[in-house]
């Protein structure tokens, strides 16, 4: 009996897939089809697969060509499958010519002519009109957005807005997009916005973008007041638009995996979370010169607070902030200590722009702990430890590029109504984060007033 194997995602099952399976089956007597998991697709940069794994498997089964369906979940699996299933022929479409020649030592490799003018990417784009996105702001994060957005199919960066003509001209020229200094004109050309302007301008821009019927992806911290966050989410809902806070850790595959493991009871009940993120900035950076809204907690607080809310919940009983400030009162290093009701949990988060620390995430439970070293906010590797020090479980996930692509892809799926990623950073978590920022600003003002009175 000749055994044939082929692999693919088979999203939005189409004629090209059908013809490939038909010809693959004809190469032998028994056909095994390997279907990729969503997690594996994410690691190889295929970010907006629409159909669930079960739907994709059902569609393959319906053709009647597959004698067996297996799951492909990691790179390097093909080599092992060929041995394990005693495969005689490996086949894929001609878009892969040359890529699998290394398997020739183990079986016959056949590249089948790809069916012309059809692909899942094409169907995804047809089903959901390309989102034309515009950027508000021309700073460093805005610069990172464009190359990452290019990797997400279904989105196209159309233009950039900044009230300062020179900044907008320079940015638009560099990235070959349209530049606008007039907000109304800018809105006319787009369906959604990415807001990467200074923190204190977010509220106004989000409101005006929603007023103009745009979906909004806003950099963290989305806003600095709880009531503003509540108002904006309600407004977005009323207008039928998506409002999405961009904390990239929330959307990175490694962190999603970590949460799954931490919340599955592996380390028992979670009792303590410690998260640290420090970044030494240039003295002339906005973060170190903006005395009203700069400083470490407004800049990095969303990152360190995020795992705390995910792991211990939003019901913080008490929060206390301590900061080291420079002579102008700018927050160089902040520590926030939180407790949860009934002595059931506590957390310490630290962040700094003027103090360097190790930048670790530590999650302690009643049975063990999870540790993620810096840069944990771009999670790619973590370890689970237990009382027995020899018992260590190690997990790794790929983290591609700057990671913004995951966030952009999830924003897009929310717009397109697939909505599978809403749980990653909920509306309620974003509102709680705004409340924490508000409390920090209130405490900071109070302690600075106190210092002034002492002098
Ligand atoms: N395939 C084909 N003809 C097409 C599309 C796909 O023969 N028009 C083949 C691929 O070469 C592969 C298999 O079908 O062997 C599964 O491909 P997959 O990557 O799932 O489909 P695509 O339509 O290429 O998906 P995407 O656009 O997401 O890359």
Image (spheres, helix red, strand yellow):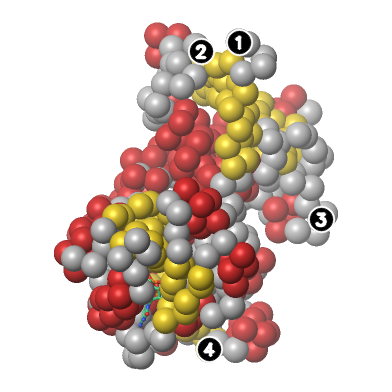
Q: Are marks 2 and 3 in contact (CB under 8 Å)?
A: no
**Percent position (x, y) of residue 18?**
26, 76
Quarter of image, res 33: bottom left
Question: Within 8 Å of ligand 1, the CB of disc 4?
Answer: no
Sequence-wise, which precedes: disc 2 or disc 3? 3
Q: Are marks 3 and 1 in contact (CB under 8 Å)?
A: no
Q: Secondary structure at mark 1?
A: loop
Gap between marks 1 and 2 measured at Cα: 7 Å
Question: Within 8 Å of ligand 1, the CB of disc 3?
Answer: no
Query: Outermost residue toward the front?
Result: 1
Sequence-wise, which precedes: disc 4 or disc 3? 4
The numbered mark at residue 367 is: 2
Q: Are marks 1 and 2 in contact (CB under 8 Å)?
A: yes
The numbered mark at residue 387 is: 1
How crowded is the residue under tag 3: few (<14 C-alpha within 10 Å), some, or many (20+)? few
The numbered mark at residue 178 is: 4
On screen, residue 353 above or below 3: above
Sequence-wise, which precedes: disc 1 or disc 4? 4
Gap between marks 2 and 3 measured at Cα: 42 Å
Sequence-wise, which precedes: disc 3 or disc 1? 3
């Amino acid at each position: 009996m000749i055994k044939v194997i082929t692999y693919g995602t088979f999203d939005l099952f189409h004629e090209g897939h059908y013809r490939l399976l038909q010809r693959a089956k004809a190469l032998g007597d028994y056909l095994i089809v390997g279907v990729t998991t969503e997690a594996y697709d994410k690691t190889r940069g295929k970010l907006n697969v629409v159909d669930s794994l079960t739907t994709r498997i059902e569609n393959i089964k319906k053709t009647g060509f597959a004698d067996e369906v297996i799951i492909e979940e990691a790179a390097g699996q093909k080599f092992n499958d060929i041995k394990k299933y005693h495969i005689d022929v490996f086949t894929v479409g001609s878009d892969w010519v040359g890529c699998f020649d290394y398997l020739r030592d183990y079986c016959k490799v056949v590249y089948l002519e790809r069916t012309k003018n059809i692909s899942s990417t094409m169907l995804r784009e047809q089903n959901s009109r390309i989102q034309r996105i515009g950027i508000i702001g021309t700073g460093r994060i805005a610069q990172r957005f464009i190359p990452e957005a290019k990797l997400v199919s279904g989105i196209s960066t159309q233009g950039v807005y900044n009230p300062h003509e020179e900044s907008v001209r320079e940015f638009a020229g560099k990235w070959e997009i349209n530049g606008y200094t007039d907000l109304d004109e800018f809105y006319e050309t787009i369906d959604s916005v990415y807001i990467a302007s200074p923190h204190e301008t977010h509220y106004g821009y989000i409101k005006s973008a929603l007023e103009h019927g745009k979906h909004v992806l806003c950099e963290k911290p989305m806003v600095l007041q709880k009531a503003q966050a509540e108002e904006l989410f309600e407004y977005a809902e009323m207008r039928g638009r998506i409002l999405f806070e961009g904390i990239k850790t929330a959307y990175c595959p490694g962190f999603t995996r970590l949460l799954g493991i931490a919340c599955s009871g592996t380390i028992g009940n979670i009792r303590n979370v410690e998260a640290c993120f420090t970044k030494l900035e240039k003295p002339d950076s906005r973060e170190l010169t903006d005395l009203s809204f700069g400083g470490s907690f407004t800049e990095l607080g969303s990152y360190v607070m995020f795992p705390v809310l995910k792991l211990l919940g939003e019901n913080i009983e008490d929060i206390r902030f301590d900061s080291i400030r420079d002579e102008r009162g700018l927050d160089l290093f902040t520590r926030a200590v939180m407790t949860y009701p009934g002595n059931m949990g506590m957390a310490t988060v630290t962040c700094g722009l003027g103090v360097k620390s190790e930048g670790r995430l530590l999650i302690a439970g009643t049975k063990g702990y999870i540790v993620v070293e810096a840069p944990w906010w771009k999670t790619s590797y973590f370890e689970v430890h237990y009382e027995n020090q020899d018992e260590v479980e190690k997990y790794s996930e790929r983290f591609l590029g700057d990671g913004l692509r995951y966030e952009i892809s999830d924003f897009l799926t929310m717009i397109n109504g697939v909505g599978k990623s809403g749980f990653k950073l909920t509306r309620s978590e974003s509102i709680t984060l705004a409340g924490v920022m508000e409390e920090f600003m209130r405490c900071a003002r109070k302690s600075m007033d106190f210092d002034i009175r002492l002098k």
